[in-house]
Image (cartoon, rainbow, N blue to C red):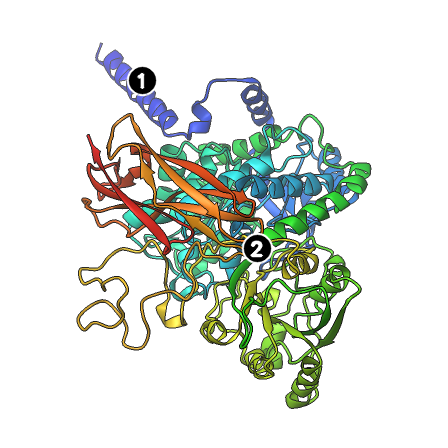
Amino acid sequence: MKNKFFILLAFTGCCIAILTACAQQKNIQSRPQNKMDVFISDLMSKMTIEEKIGQLNLLTGGEAITGTTGNSDLENKVKRGEVGGFFSLTTPARIRKVQELAVNNTRLKIPLIFGLDVIHGYKTTFPIPLGLSATWDMPLIEKTARIAAEEASADGINWTFSPMVDISRDPRWGRVSEGNGEDPFLGAEIAKAMVKGYQGDDLAKYNTLMACVKHFALYGAGEAGRDYNTVDMSKVRMYNEFMPPYKAAIEAGAGSVMTSFNEIDGVPASANQWLLTDLLRKDWKFDGLVVTDYTAINEMIDHGIGNLQEVSAKAVKAGVDMDMVGEGFLTTLKKSLDEGKVSEADINRACRLILEAKYKLGLFEDPYRYCNEERAKTTIFTPENRKFAREVAAKSFVLLKNAPTAGHTNAVLPLKRTGTIALIGPLADSRVNMPGTWSVSTDLAKAVSVKDGLQQVAGPQVKILHALGSNLIEDAAYQARATMFGREIPRDNRPKEQVLQEAIAIAKKADVIVAALGESSEMSGESSSRTDIQIPKIQRELLEELVKTGKPVVLVLFTGRPLDLSWEEKNVPAILNTWFGGTETGLAIADVLFGDVNPSGKLTATFPQNIGQIPMYYNHKNTGRPLAEGKWFTKFKSNYLDVSNEPLYPFGYGLSYTTFDIQAPVLDKTTLRSGEQINISVSVKNTGKVDGAEVVQLYIRDLVGSITRPVKELKGFQKVYLKAGETKNLTFTLSEEDLMFYNSNLDFVAEPGDFKVFVGNSSTNVKSADFKLEK
């Protein structure tokens, strides 16, 4: 009897242990059985542990290297079943060849997945993401992702490492160009649009891409604006200000997530169990695969948390499923399993999620479904796609300034289609810099330069004279670092004064000067941080001399980040920020300069007066000693001695060739209760002489909270097109959910009390009304 008791006790304990282990598995393994689950379970039952580990290995095909190392012996690794997928390998012929290696030479014939950095278009390249966000046009942004998916999938790709949804408030960081700016609400809306555009309504369709949300998480908040650097912030700030775009992308159905390089609470993201399991899997219910960034597992050795075996084990236990390039899983996980440092359940989870992604993409049904060479010939870089790219680029440009020159009453822009234009600057005749950073698939030779665009659009009565004026950067070594990956700008090695005077002589012959200046495309992007965010000094000197000619000057500004344009704002009559507009940049610039398109872009990142104001963003908190509105220096208040607290150009700012009047918001009630909503009416009129578009923006302020709250938070926007003289009435709604935030306990709450609502055409140019929340 005693023995039976102990046997029963042992059996009960075993059952409890099994049940506990099952309960700890990820959400993906607790779902009801369906056709996919049955298929994957059956396949995995036949797999050896080595074959499972092989699926966790993502290698580079070598076409676009984004790190310091690559992979070797690729063919034999595929044949041995040591590869789950490739990235940076394109064209149906190449991909079919590699897929055949996997399907025809491995025991279980498991197909490979093929990914690529399709960031802002494929062959047809759209504006850099920071520029694209300046359109504030969600259907348009979604369509750019849809076209990118159509083109890339026609070239054999089925997985994109996009969208990047990192919030950043530091323009020193180069990858601000790849994100959507500083605001979590707008960032979340764009994240949803991009995921929907890439994935469509069914990943099994041959013209979709699986999205990959990156970089999870907080990558845009690196200290000192330096890439890959440390991030340290409170969870209240994480949840309220930085996490919403990631969460929105997950809720939109993104199939995968990429880990970031930085640490969070002292633990690198790729080994952070709180981030990848507790938050992502358990709280957000994510059931897709998690892949690291390029060699991120190996880089945790330098972070100082273990050797390759140790960091690889930590990564898979934290919730990483696929190792990009590093091969730490491939070379160490079996040993860690034998030593009890990882469990078979950890490996099974990762393998299952990768196999499920392949299943959802239809690769088990047809491994070659993305390898149709005829489709590639008719789908990629079509005239229709290029036409749309031209429209998108023009809508992304932000008119920062447009004033008359001395002695004139009319603004400089738009230009007349008569007379002589002096086109000057190191970026005036560069095709290769127009697509911008992270355009790895673009045929740079087919991009349209500013000179090309003006010549095609100007018409026969406009004469265009061209001169370099200056090199991009005076320091040749710096220029080499800023023009990598085929983006070289030839240097003129004559004395710089000779190059300058040649341009001035041409400028004096012209009626107007168009100065194409700013950053080259690789002055922003990955590993392209800058401590000086002004236009390079040698270009500034050129611009100063052009202004001295007394001719009207239009600065066509290229940039992948907010810049310090304080001198330019004071001295140049017209500034058009064109970011990097993609393959059709030159044509789009000409369309706007000549008034065929009325600019409607609005900033999604604040431009500071100088670098000393950084970090600078509109939705900041008040201090206990706030500076009074409209004031500058007041002793013992929060301000600077040498410059005001105001930005040079605020979030949401952008001019037009027409003017708009936005009336004060009218609320249908002043008290909001649970289950109700407030309707906010806004009258908008085009008060100018040309048709145009305005972005009407709605902000709120929670006046009293259990924790400090931002001075403004974007909660809605509408882009409205109005003919000259036309008036439209817009309606916004606010509910209790729109007022919710994470409190100090990380509870998502709306607290009763007083609120303000603001409506206007930027974060600073607004009119307000009051309401309260009662519960």
Residue 742 x %, y %? 28, 41
The tag on residue 11 is: 1
Of labels 2 and 1, earlier in sequence is 1
At 64% across and 90% down in the image, what residue appears?
497
The tag on residue 599 is: 2
* 254 vs 125, nearest the viewer: 125
- Please, what is the three-letter code of the amino acid marked with disc 1? Phe
- Near mark 1 (Cα within 10 A), the count class, few <14, some 14-19 or many ≥20, is few
**In the picture shown, does residue 540 fall above or below 459?**
below
- Please, what is the three-letter code of the amino acid marked with disc 2? Pro
* 15 vs 163, nearest the viewer: 163
Q: Is residue 658 left or right of residue 340?
A: right
The count of marks equals 2
SS type, badge 2: loop
- Near mark 2 (Cα within 10 A), the count class, few <14, some 14-19 or many ≥20, is many
Q: Residue 439 falls in which quadrant of the image?
A: bottom right
Q: Residue 86 falls in which quadrant of the image?
A: top right
Q: Residue 643 falls in which quadrant of the image?
A: bottom left
Image quarter hosting the C terminus: top left
Residue 252 x %, y %? 49, 34
Q: CA distance from mark 2 to mark 1?
A: 74 Å
**In the picture shown, does residue 86 fall above or below 206?**
below
Q: Is residue 717 left or right of residue 620?
A: right
The tag on residue 406 is: none
| Res. 314 visible in picture | no
